[in-house]
Image (cartoon, rainbow, N blue to C red):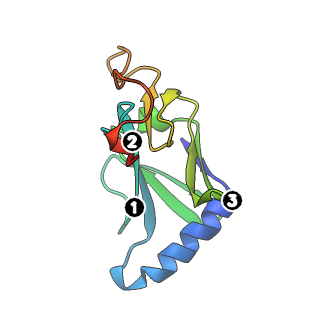
Amino acid sequence: MVTVTESAAAKIKELLAQEAEEEVSVLRVAVQGGGCSGFQYALGFDRGPQDGDNEVEMHGVRVVVDPHSAPYLVGSEIDYVDALMGAGFAINNPNVTAACGCGSSFQAKEDAEGEPAAAHAGGGCGPGCGH
């Protein structure tokens, strides 16, 4: 399903420790419609997996993906990058055919029905990216 790098796992553990009062135990990764390229990633903490979720545990962290998002995330790698331009999570997804310049949204190879996924008609980075 998805893999998690050691640096991402370390950051997830750090963030989970800060959320101890909320009783969260997993990172939920999802794909939602929107953004300037058709889809965008959503990452957040949850109390645990729900019925139908795909679950993986790597480097001591649990990651769950809902059944709707799973086809778009197969083979993806979750990484944490601390670079000159800023720090944050990066999802390296082999199912992406085009991405917004800011990297917050993407176009998938095909949607669940086998049709090409909708892309932002103007190309580039639109208002959904905050630029």
Secondary-structure class at tag 2: strand
Question: What is the CA distance from the residue labelled 2 to the residue labelled 3?
Answer: 24 Å
The front one of 91 and 29 is 91
Badge 2 vs badge 3, beta-carbon distance below 8 Å: no
Residue of label 2: 40
* Residue 71 against residue 114 in the figure, above or below: below
Residue 84's label in the rendered image is 3
Q: Is residue 9 left or right of residue 130?
A: right
Q: Amino acid at mark 3?
A: Leu
Tag in front: 1 or 2: 2
Residue 23, given in percent of the width and then of the height, sits at 36, 79
The front one of 15 and 38 is 38
* Residue 43 against residue 32 in the figure, above or below: below
Quick one: label 2, few (<14), some, or many (20+) residues within 10 Å? many
Question: What is the CA distance from the residue labelled 3 to the residue labelled 1?
Answer: 24 Å
Residue 69, given in percent of the width and then of the height, sits at 38, 39
| Residue drawn at the location 37% of the way across and 49% of the way down | 130
* Residue 69 against residue 45 in the figure, above or below: above
* Residue 66 against residue 88 in the figure, above or below: above
Residue 33, given in percent of the width and then of the height, sits at 30, 37
User: Of label 2 and label 3, which has the lower sequence position?
Assistant: 2
Q: Amino acid at mark 1?
A: Gly
> Image quarter for residue 81?
bottom right
> Image quarter for residue 84?
bottom right
Residue of label 1: 44
Tag in front: 2 or 3: 3
Tag in front: 3 or 1: 3
Residue occupying the far front of the picture? 131
Q: Amino acid at mark 2?
A: Gln
The front one of 2 and 109 is 109
Q: Is residue 30 left or right of residue 34?
A: right
